[in-house]
Amino acid sequence: MMSQKVKAQAKITHIAVFVSNLEQSTAFYKDVMDFEEIEEPFKDGLHAWFDIGNNLQLHVIEDKWQPITINKNNHICFSIPDMDVFISKLNDKNVAFENWVGEKGKINVRPDGIKQVYLRDPDGYWIEINNEYN
């Protein structure tokens, strides 16, 4: 009998984001993105953890800021159930957004009909928001 090679399947558990100001980034992810802040083990004032759904977490980590190159192709995407409600919230909070090509205040529609917008967090990281919510 031949032994079968068992392949361990990795799964994503969290995304870590390096930030320059924990308080400012925590407010953004709580107030704009509506993520629930959860317990984090470090308790050092440099970490904030968020439940982002689907058993996934976002770990926001403050450290001495070092300039980084940020490109829209490198982004985090979150799907929401109602694009109109989210856009209204962005407008109420004066959070700028754009479509893929960079037109301010515009919504992008993919060939499959999914709507998307792009915005930046306080450190300039690109975030895609789309309505591919299941």
Image (cartoon, rainbow, N blue to C red):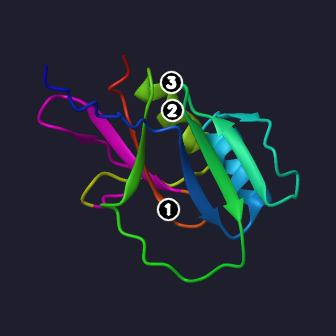
Residue 132 is covered by the magenta coloring: no
The amino acid pointed to by label 3 is Asn
The extreme top residue here reads: 134
- Relative to residue 86, is residue 62 depicted above or below? below
Residue for point 52% across, 66% down:
124
Q: Amino acid at mark 2?
A: Phe
- Residue 47 visible in rendering: yes
Magenta residues, start to end: 102-120
Mark closer to the observer (1, 2) = 1
Q: Residues within 10 Å of mark 1 (few under 14, many from 20)?
A: some
Residue at 51 percent of width and 26 percent of height: 85
- Image location of residue 5, percent across then percent down: 23, 32
* Left or right of 14 in this view: 78: left
Would you say residue 93 is visible in this rendering? no
Which residue, as the protein is rendered here, is positioned at the far bottom? 67
Q: Which residue is mark 3?
A: 54
C-alpha separation, residue under disc 3 versus residue under disc 1: 22 Å
The residue tagged 2 is: 86
SS of the residue at dot 3? loop
Please, what secondary structure does the residue beneath circle 2 have?
A: helix
